[in-house]
Image (tube, rainbow, N blue to C red):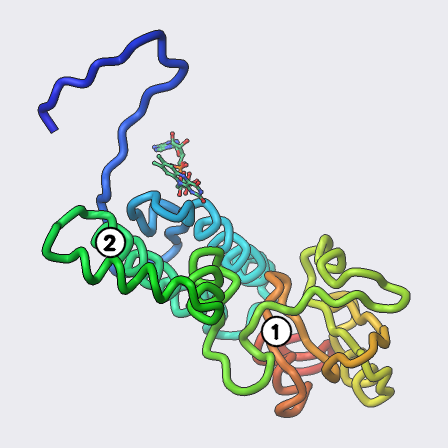
Amino acid sequence: MGRPIEITGRPAWMTRFTDNTRLAGDYREGRVLLAGDAAHVHSPFGGQGLNLGLQDAANLGWKLAATLAGRAPGGLIDTYAAERRPVAARVLHNTRAQIALMNPVPERTPLYELFAELMDLDQVNRFLAEMISGVGVHYGAGRTLTGHFVPDLTLEGPGRVRDLFAAGRPVLLDLTDDPAVRKTAAGWAGRLDVVTGSPAGTPGPLLVRPDGYVAWAGERNLEEALTEWFGPPYGGAGK
Ligand SMILES: Cc1cc2nc3c(=O)[nH]c(=O)nc-3n(C[C@H](O)[C@H](O)[C@H](O)COP(=O)(O)OP(=O)(O)OC[C@H]3O[C@@H](n4cnc5c(N)ncnc54)[C@H](O)[C@@H]3O)c2cc1C
């Protein structure tokens, strides 16, 4: 700040940025919802801001659409802030850590060296890569795949899982070709895509939200999970 900078040549683009770090106290005030940099700002280290904002939008979009269409289960819209704000807080935390590590303070040299040594370990590398890329993001996950991003399986017939979400609907991956699963899913026909496939060595049926996160991996009743995330079945209460 306040130092002259010599610029030789003609710059094609000029901007300024700082390590300004802020997180909105709440992502929702009535009908106003915050996403992207409006909800969180941080230093650009690690190139995480755009990804974070896009994931906000992916999380919010289908919940907002269901709410506006009058078919959202109670409280669905509030899961947006509940899920996404902690993710942003974590990014603010790791970008602050990067600033601390980049500050050349001679007394901290042993700490920098120790961190560099740790980064030689595969497990540490994986942890940091998953954190910076956002691949490690999960929502209240337990021991099953629920709350995690769906693995990009290749299914015999339907192909890559990642290509199944273009319609913006939830997807039930009926990997066991189970008639009971199909019968339950029929109650949500038109709101849910059911895909049958049988890749080798993959988990049982998975209910995946339109943003790609697993809502159910067989740990409880499927009807309960469908109702919790996508409202009651046709013919059920609140039709
Ligand atoms: C130097 C730098 C490098 C970065 N590098 C990366 C990177 O490598 N990877 C990464 O993922 N992220 C990176 N980021 C972060 C990323 O750029 C932002 O997180 C992202 O652009 C935020 O998108 P956004 O749509 O939320 O907000 P913005 O991009 O700020 O978009 C908001 C838009 O709203 C408009 N607007 C504002 N007020 C009004 C109004 N009243 N009416 C109408 N329009 C309005 C603005 O003009 C702007 O176009 C970087 C940021 C900086 C500063």
Q: Residue at x 48, y 63 (%)?
A: 130
In the foreground, 109 or 167? 109
Q: Residue at x 43, y 56 (%)?
A: 132
Q: Quadrant of ligand 1?
A: top left
Q: Name above or below for residue 32 compared with residue 212.
A: above
Ligand 1 under 8 Å from disc 2 Cβ: no
In front: label 2 or label 1: 2
The part of the image, by quadrant, that contains residue 238 is: bottom right
Q: Residue at x 24, y 57 (%)?
A: 112
Q: Which mark is residue 101?
A: 2
Asked if residue 210 can be seen in this view, the reply is yes
Three-letter code, disc 2 = Leu
In the foreground, 213 or 77? 213
Residue 128 image point, x, y percent: 42, 62
Q: Residue at x 49, y 66 (%)?
A: 126
147 on left or right of 84: right
Q: Secondary structure at mark 2?
A: helix
Quadrant location, the N terminus: top left
For the view shown, which residue lies furthest in the right direction?
157
Residue 82 image point, x, y percent: 39, 69
The part of the image, by quadrant, that contains residue 206 is: bottom right
Residue 213 image point, x, y percent: 59, 68
Q: Which mark is residue 214?
A: 1
Asked if residue 29 can be seen in this view, the reply is no
- Labelled pair 2, 1 in contact (Cβ < 8 Å): no
Residue 236 image point, x, y percent: 69, 82
**Residue count near mark 2 (Cα–Cα under 10 Å), binned few <14, some 14–19, many ≥20:** some
Q: Name above or below for residue 239 compared with residue 102.
A: below
